[in-house]
Image (tube, helix red, strand yellow):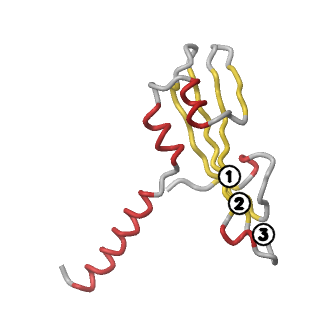
Amino acid sequence: MKPLVQFPLSGFLVVLIGCSLVVPKETLYLRAAQNLATQAEVRERLGAPREETSTPDGESQWVYEVREVEASAQNTWATAGSWCDQYVLTFDRQGMLQGWTHKSYFHGGETMPIRCDSGVLKSAL
């Protein structure tokens, strides 16, 4: 391969690998726990959910919100905002984790929004 092509290709691979290593710990846990963990085990690992609801079928849905303030949001001139990751977990009638979704929202200028999903949804890669 020519050196001029090798360098950009190598740089692209480093960025791609680096981005794949930045996976939230909640996502890693939920991937491993799906169809295996009970409500009690999830609560022990992730804490109390922000919201709990039940469906007419007897399934339960739990909502977790994980917030992170932008690094530059603490300056005295302006507030950059915050990120909020929302996880919606679904449990069957027996209390086993059946599925989950993850969405990231950006809140420009807000460091502590009331609801996670009131921000701008981050587009999927």
Rendered position, 73 above or below 87: below
Q: Which residue is identified by label 2? A: 82
Q: Which residue is identified by label 3? A: 79
Q: Secondary structure at mark 3?
A: loop
How far apart, in angstroms, are the residues tagged by discs 1 and 2? 7 Å
**Would you say the residues marked 1 and 2 are in contact, meaning their CB atoms lie under 8 Å apart?**
yes
In front: 104, or 5? Answer: 104
Q: Hey, what amino acid is under mark 3?
A: Thr
Q: Hey, what amino acid is under mark 2?
A: Ser
Q: Which residue is identified by label 1? A: 67
Q: Which mark is residue 24?
A: none
Q: Residues within 10 Å of mark 1 (few under 14, many from 20)?
A: some
Q: Position of residue 50 (x, y in %)?
A: 72, 36
Residue shown at 37% from the left, 62% from the top: 17
> 98 left or right of 73?
left
In front: 108, or 73? Answer: 73
Q: Hey, what amino acid is under mark 1?
A: Arg
> 28 left or right of 44?
left
Q: Position of residue 26 (x, y in %)?
A: 54, 43
In front: 47, or 52? Answer: 47
Q: Residue furthest front?
A: 44
Residue shown at 67% from the left, 65% from the top: 70
> 75 left or right of 125?
right
